[in-house]
Image (cartoon, rainbow, N blue to C red):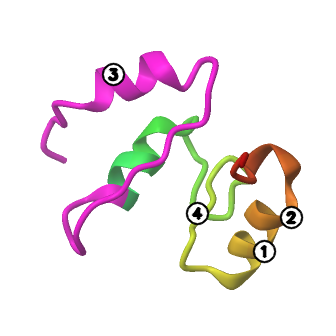
C-alpha cells in the first residue's frame, strides 16, 4: 500500500473522536480505514462502519451520538 499523506492526521484525531473518510470510488478509502484497525481486524469489525451497507447505515442513524444537531 502506498503511504497516505493523511494517515497521521487521522490517527491523531481518532483517539478522541469519530473520523469519516470520504472520496471518489476506487481511491483506497477502505484500505486506509482497515489499515487503521488493529492487526487482523477486517470489515466485520465493530469499529468499521460502511455507509453503503444498509445495516451499518441503520446503526449509524439509530445512534443519538451520530444524529445531526439542529
Look at the image and give the residue range highlighted in magenta. 1-29
Label 3 residue SS: helix
Q: Mark 3 vs mark 4: which is more N-terminal?
A: 3
Q: Which residue is disc 4 drawn over?
A: 43
Question: Where does the image place residue 9, in percent across and percent down from the top left?
Answer: 33, 22
Label 1 residue SS: helix
Q: CA–CA distance between discs 4 and 2? A: 20 Å
Q: Main secondary structure of the magenta part?
A: loop
Q: Mark 1 vs mark 4: which is more N-terminal?
A: 4
14 on left or right of 63 = left
Q: Which mark is residue 9?
A: 3
Mark 1 or 4, which is nearer the eye?
1
Label 4 residue SS: loop
Q: 22 and 39: which one is in front?
A: 22
In the displayed structure, would residue 54 be above or below residue 36?
below
Where is residue 7, by image quadrant?
top left
Amino acid at each position: 500500500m502506498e503511504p497516505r499523506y493523511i494517515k497521521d492526521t487521522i490517527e491523531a484525531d481518532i483517539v478522541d473522536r469519530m473520523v469519516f473518510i470520504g472520496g471518489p470510488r476506487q481511491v483506497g478509502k477502505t484500505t486506509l480505514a482497515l489499515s487503521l484497525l488493529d492487526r487482523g481486524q477486517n470489515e466485520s469489525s465493530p469499529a468499521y462502519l460502511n455507509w453503503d451497507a444498509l445495516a451499518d447505515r441503520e446503526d449509524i442513524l439509530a445512534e443519538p451520538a451520530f444524529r445531526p444537531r439542529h
